[in-house]
Structure formats: C-alpha cells, structure tokens
Amino acid sequence: MTTGWDEYWIEFYGDLIGHYRRNGFLNPEYPVLSIGMVEDILQCYLKIIDLITAERPCFQYIASGILLQILGLLFAAVKYQQFEGKNIENRIIQAKLVLNENMQSPVSQEKIAGEIGMGYSLYRKKFKEYTGISPTQYQIHLKITKAKELLIASAMTLKEIAYSLGFDSTDYFYRLFKKKTGSTPSEYREKNIR
C-alpha cells in the first residue's frame, strides 16, 4: 500500500546555522516560514535529492552549498514579502536605478530620497530593509564592482579608474578597494589577468 507521496527533509547544523538562529532568521518557536511556492527553492531542493540519490563523490559538499543557497532564497523571500506589490518597492527600485545611473558622480542620498517622495530617514531605513545594506554602502558596492570590471577588462590606469568612478583621491580608492576585496587594485588586476 502506498501513501501517494514521498517525504524528504534536510537535516543541517553548524556555525552558520547558529548565526541564523542568533539573528532570529531561524527561530524554533516559529519553525514554518510561509513563503508560498518559490520555483528556485524547489529546483535547489530537487538538486539535493538527485545528489543524495546518485551518491557521486563529494556529494555532501555540493549539497551543503545548495542548502546555503536555499537558506539565502528563503531569507530573501521572507524579506521580499513585506515589500511585494507595495509602493515602497517601486520607490526603492527607483532609488537603485538613480544610484546606478550616477555611479561616477557624487549624488546626495537626501536628494534621491526627495526625488522618490520619501523623507531621508525613512528612505535609509526602507532601503536597508529591502537590500540588506544602506544606500551609501550600495553605492560603494556598485563602484567597487565597476572597478573590478575595469581593472580586468581595460587598460586604464588605477588613477583613471579612481577618477572615472568619482573617487576624490586615488589613496581613498586604494584603501576602500582593499577593505572591500582584501586586495589592492594592482593585486586584483595582476591576479585576475593572469
């Protein structure tokens, strides 16, 4: 006699799971996260089942990586629910577009807040809730990502890259790049062009 379905579950533990629990994302008092049907999560889950069924070499390591992806997707789905279909989502997306378009020039966060019809404090709070980082950190992330691209794909000097991205000085660019990537711009270029 069959039940009509198969049951699968994933058991996991470790330092990262402890981090998620300490920060309230995984809470034993609320063990079910209601996110509806998310195709990406389902596909990841099915990949894990396939890996475990096939038992290829090192499948546990691959499965644990996919599990982290599932947790990231779950976290994003939970966070996204509070914005989905609301006017605030459109405003934050609009702010992100302004930041992308003005990556090379200084742009006032207060001005962006005004342009999207929000007070500065509310804008900063909602932007961080939506993206996980402050608007200023988001802007820095954009610049560092573009700098990485230019270091690999262009013959521009480090000074040219720094100024093209709106950094006031090459020293500040160097320090910030190293802080965010762990390498100086020169080291990053050398390592990735090789």
Image (cartoon, rainbow, N blue to C red):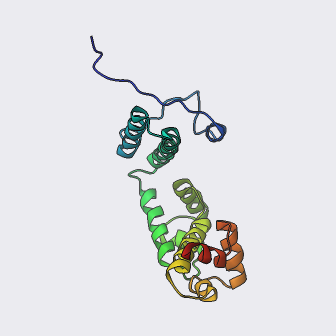
* Quadrant location of the C terminus in the rendered image: bottom right
The image shows residue 136 at horizontal and vertical percentages of 61, 68
Asked which quadrant contains residue 111, the reply is: bottom right
Asked which quadrant contains residue 44, the reply is: top left
The image shows residue 79 at horizontal and vertical percentages of 50, 47
In this view, the residue in front, 154 or 112, is 154
User: In the rendered view, would you say 151 is above or below 58?
Assistant: below
Horizontally, residue 44 falls left or right of residue 19, namely left
Q: Residue at x 59, y 59 (%)?
A: 133
Q: Residue at x 45, y 28 (%)?
A: 9
User: In the rendered view, would you say 71 is above or below 121?
Assistant: above
In this view, the residue in front, 175 or 107, is 175
In this view, the residue in front, 163 or 184, is 184
In this view, the residue in front, 89 or 34, is 34
Q: Residue at x 64, y 82 (%)?
A: 167
Callout count? 0
The image shows residue 50 at horizontal and vertical percentages of 38, 37
* Quadrant location of the N terminus in the rendered image: top left
Asked which quadrant contains residue 181, the reply is: bottom right
